[in-house]
Image (cartoon, grey):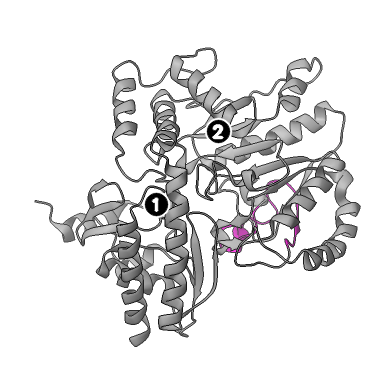
């Protein structure tokens, strides 16, 4: 039997937890995980619902049988061999599946989202050099977030992550995406056109310095689940294409079914040159990311005879266990009709959020797309609003982790309707507790 207090004390002597203020653990000790299955996690606090897909990656929930079986089968053969000059059936099948989903013929594997974005930035810089262009800067969106390396933070605009490292990495011009709304697929076109005219002169001024535009398509996750206009995104992408800038879609959070389609890009009438995927790709079982690359970029490097080749050497590129998990995840999403299921639970999620807002009067600015819904908790003028809410949610039986005042649900895509109903009940009771103290 695990001694809870002793284990937590041992943890805090040695473990520096990610994206956390270690001082906060004095008031909010880490949760001890014993087991996880589907949308449920079994902890020292009892059984809890995973309302955030454990940092947005559990596309099929925890311990999905087909994914676990694929990993075990691969493990009985080999776990990892250098990917530089080897291949095997699973990686070929995964490459074919990703090409079909994305329309991009070429895939470059890495291990995590930041690495995928780093590869994409390097590809854009390197490709511009091959074309004889002196373009070394990037265009990104205000409130965008793209990872934790120096390169990816330099194209990000979430100050709590990037401020200490400001000025390092690549030079980036941040563009206002315009008014945020309740759904990125619905917007006031006249308002967007007016906004476009205000930013266009600046874009025209910097275009010769920039090699690529990088965006989180439609939803800016780490900034607070902000939804911006599809119409704006299409306009800036068309402008980028017409000015020979590469377009990079960071779909690390929005990809693999989160928005109700395989990719957020599927909601658009324009395509990116480079797409980055991770998180839900293996249903969170093993680290894996990939960069999906347009044939024109691949061919540019393939035909190049004067510049160095692209030699990004990721040790775990195409790790066989992760590849087998990813292939099983994509196959299971198809076979179990998961994308169709997300359309059912997404409607319930949005309705429940509106019901809770109406009942409590404590949630505003509700926005949603696919299997994601978010809103702002009313500021109660007390510190640590999000952390306090998370503790009440834990007491009632859910893992929820607000971003500052932004409360959001981002459950596994195959979460049952019953569990969504239970998540709504937990949220309602947690809000009552939060504001009566």
Residue shown at 42% from the left, 45% from the top: 59
Outermost residue to the left? 1
Residue count near mark 1 (Cα–Cα under 10 Å), binned few <14, some 14–19, many ≥20: many
Residue shown at 74% from the left, 67% from the top: 188
User: Which portion, as a residue range, is magenta?
Assistant: 156-177
Q: Position of residue 52 (x, y in %)?
A: 40, 56
Say the numbered circle drawn on residue 53. 1
**Is 411 rendered above or below residue 169?**
below
Q: Is residue 170 magenta?
A: yes
Q: Position of residue 402 (x, y in %)?
A: 44, 66
Describe residue 359's horizontal placement relative to residue 370 as left or right.
Answer: left
- Of tags 1 and 2, the one toward the viewer is 1
Q: CA distance from mark 1 to mark 2?
A: 20 Å
Q: Secondary structure at mark 2?
A: strand
Quadrant for the C terminus in the image: bottom left
**Is 273 rendered above or below residue 206?**
above
**Is 78 rendered above or below residue 190?**
above
Q: Position of residue 88 (x, y in %)?
A: 46, 14
Describe residue 375's horizontal placement relative to residue 125 as left or right.
Answer: left
Q: Which residue is mark 2?
A: 290
Q: Is residue 390 magenta?
A: no
Q: Is residue 357 visible?
A: yes
Name the one closer to the observer, 118 or 106.
Answer: 106
Q: Position of residue 14 (x, y in %)?
A: 31, 51
Which of the 4 image quarters holds residue 337?
top left
């Amino acid at each position: 039997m695990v001694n809870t207090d002793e284990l937590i004390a041992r943890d805090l002597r040695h473990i520096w937890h990610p994206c956390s203020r270690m001082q906060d653990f004095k008031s909010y000790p880490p949760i001890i995980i014993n087991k996880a299955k589907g949308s449920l996690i079994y902890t020292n606090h009892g059984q809890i619902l995973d309302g955030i897909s454990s940092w947005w990656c559990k596309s099929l929930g925890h311990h999905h049988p087909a994914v676990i079986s694929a990993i075990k089968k691969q493990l009985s053969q080999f776990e990892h061999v250098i990917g530089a000059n080897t291949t095997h059936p699973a990686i070929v099948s995964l490459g074919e599946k990703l090409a079909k989903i994305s329309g991009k013929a070429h895939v470059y594997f890495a291990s995590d989202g930041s690495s995928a974005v780093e590869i994409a930035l390097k590809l854009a810089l390197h490709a511009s050099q091959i074309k004889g262009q002196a373009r070394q800067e990037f265009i990104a969106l205000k409130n965008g977030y793209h990872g934790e390396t120096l390169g990816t933070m330099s194209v990000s605009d979430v100050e709590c992550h990037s401020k200490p490292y400001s000025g390092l990495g690549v030079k980036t011009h941040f563009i206002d995406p315009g008014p945020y709304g309740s759904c990125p697929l619905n917007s006031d076109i006249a308002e967007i056109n007016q906004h476009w005219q205000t930013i266009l002169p600046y874009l025209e001024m910097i275009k010769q310095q920039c090699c690529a535009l990088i965006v989180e398509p439609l939803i800016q996750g780490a900034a607070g689940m902000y939804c911006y206009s599809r119409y704006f995104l299409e306009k800036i992408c068309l402008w980028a294409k017409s000015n020979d800038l590469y377009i990079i879609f960071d779909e690390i959070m929005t990809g693999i079914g989160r928005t109700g389609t395989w990719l957020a890009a599927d909601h658009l009438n324009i395509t990116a040159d480079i797409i980055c995927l991770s998180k839900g790709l293996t249903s969170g079982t093993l680290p894996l990311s990939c960069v999906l690359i347009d044939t024109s970029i691949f061919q540019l490097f393939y035909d190049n005879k004067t510049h160095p080749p692209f030699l990004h050497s990721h040790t775990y590129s195409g790790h066989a266990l992760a590849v087998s998990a990813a292939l099983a995840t994509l196959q299971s999403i198809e076979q179990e009709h998961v994308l169709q299921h997300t359309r059912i639970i997404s409607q319930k999620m949005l309705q429940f959020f509106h019901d809770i807002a109406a009942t409590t009067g404590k949630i505003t600015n509700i926005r949603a797309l696919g299997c994601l819904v978010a809103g702002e908790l009313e500021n109660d003028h007390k510190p640590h609003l999000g952390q306090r809410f998370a503790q009440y949610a834990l007491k009632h039986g859910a893992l929820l982790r607000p971003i500052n005042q932004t409360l959001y649900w981002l459950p596994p895509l195959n979460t049952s309707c019953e569990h969504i109903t239970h998540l709504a009940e937990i949220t309602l009771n947690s809000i009552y507790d939060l504001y009566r103290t």
